[in-house]
Amino acid sequence: MVEERQLTHEKLHKAVAGNGAAFRCRRRLQPGGGAGDKVFPPTFAGAVYAVEQRRVPGRNTSVTCVLLDSVQSQANRMELALQEALDASKLKLPVVEVDFTSWSPTDNTEADEKAGHLIDDIGKITSLQVPHRLADAILRDSEAEEEHDGEKLTMPFRQSAKGKALNTANALNATALYQLCPTALVFGMWDSTGPKGGLGAKFERALVSEVVGIGAEVGDLVRGVRRDPLEIRRVVKVLKPADKNWVIADAKAKGAVAPSEVNHSSVPFPKDRTEKTDKNLYAGTTIEYAEQLTTLSLIVLRRLRFPLPKKDEKETDEEHLKRCKEADVAGRTVLAALGLCGATLAFESGMGLRSRCLLWPDGPMMWELLATPGKDPQPFLLTGEDAIKLLNTAVAEASKTGLIWEVEPLKLQPQQKLVDLVRLSQIEATKEESEGGA
């Protein structure tokens, strides 16, 4: 029987400071409905699944596999788990927050348009929720308030003191990013739309995870998705006037459309597997089992440096250098704990990936430390509660070296042009839903 161990800060620090290569978690899952139940993978361009042949341990030949959750999607789920823990006051984490609440909607849509209010209330969005973390356009197109010579000034985020720090950030100078958005150092980031363009700060992913269905059989096209109880036929055409109040069309009327365009009649579907339409829907897939493989690379984290200013004039160069080296290890340990925490919290929240894709693990989550080549990995059990404690301890230890991260969010306001862009998009979405939504 594998010996179960608790992962402590001391063990994590030792692995980061030493030659540990990575932590990994590999586990099998079955559909929530049981073995053999269908699951629905994500669809990609062309409304297709990501199906490929893979080599699987214990098989002599390659096996048909289907991607159930991508690396990017897994990272988003882990960030969401951290956001939920942050909202529940279970942990404190540096985030940048854009507050849309000052642009909340009213009961008068016409007044909303004139005042620049949003139709749907967005609320607050943080760097844990935007697609590109600290380099996201939502943050770029928001404003920060700073005090200069006793006067409060408002300026674009990337022109503020903290925003400018991203312009000089790199693997050897990651202190500002650690203090402002440490998840960017764990899940990766590329500041491709900043002032340096493609030469902007680029950080490799340290944490990679994906879920794959092994032994996949893709289902046939969906047929008879929705049956209309009124048996309305598509040969009977209708017109959609500007006021959206449809009318029956004359036989030769221009612009006549099928009743499905105003949400009447059955959903069209292809007659055979070779017929392609813009509404092709595949009926999921069956799998032998699913596997989730998560890897946290300590090698990637060791490439990061966290330079610190001198404490005071009394601190010698030798003392300062020693403290910076201690801060490097302490900062990497915090990031390792942050990655383990995000992954563990996401795993514990369940594997409901999307509609009709609920997965259930065969056993408890077990982390393994790849520490010494040629030797068996060291196993560790880690609960969400223990992961939060591990992170809090690592943050406290790092602060002793002078590497301190901000626990209060950096608050931004969206620029007017961003609000206008969102508001107009909401108006268009409302039109689309009224005119042709399902």
Image (cartoon, rainbow, N blue to C red):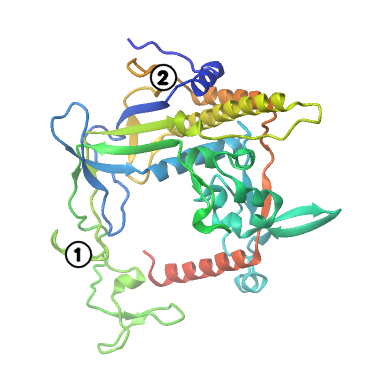
Instruction: Name the image quarter holding residue 212.
Output: top left
Most foreground residue, 179 or 42:
179
| Disc number placed over residue 409 in the picture, else none | none
What number of labels is visible?
2
Q: Locate the C terminus and report the quarter of the image it occupies.
A: bottom left
Instruction: Name the image quarter holding residue 213.
Output: top left
Q: x and y percent of residue 171 in the render? A: 54, 40
**Residue at 50% across, 26% down:** 384
Q: Dot 1 corresponds to which residue? A: 276
Residue 396 visible: no
Which residue appears farthest toward the front when viewing the image?
A: 317
Position of 191 compared to 207: left or right?
Answer: right
Q: x and y percent of residue 357 in the render? A: 33, 42
| Disc number placed over residue 371 in the picture, else none | 2
Residue 432 visible: yes
Crowding around mark 1 (Cα neighbors within 10 Å: few <14, some 14 to 19, many 20+) is few
Q: Locate the N terminus and report the quarter of the image it occupies.
A: top left
**Residue at 21% across, 63% down:** 269
Most foreground residue, 287 or 61:
61
**Residue at 22% across, 45% down:** 52
Most foreground residue, 139 or 435:
139
Amino acid type at image mark 1: Lys
When the figure is inspected, residue 405 is found, relative to residue 389, above or below; the finding is below
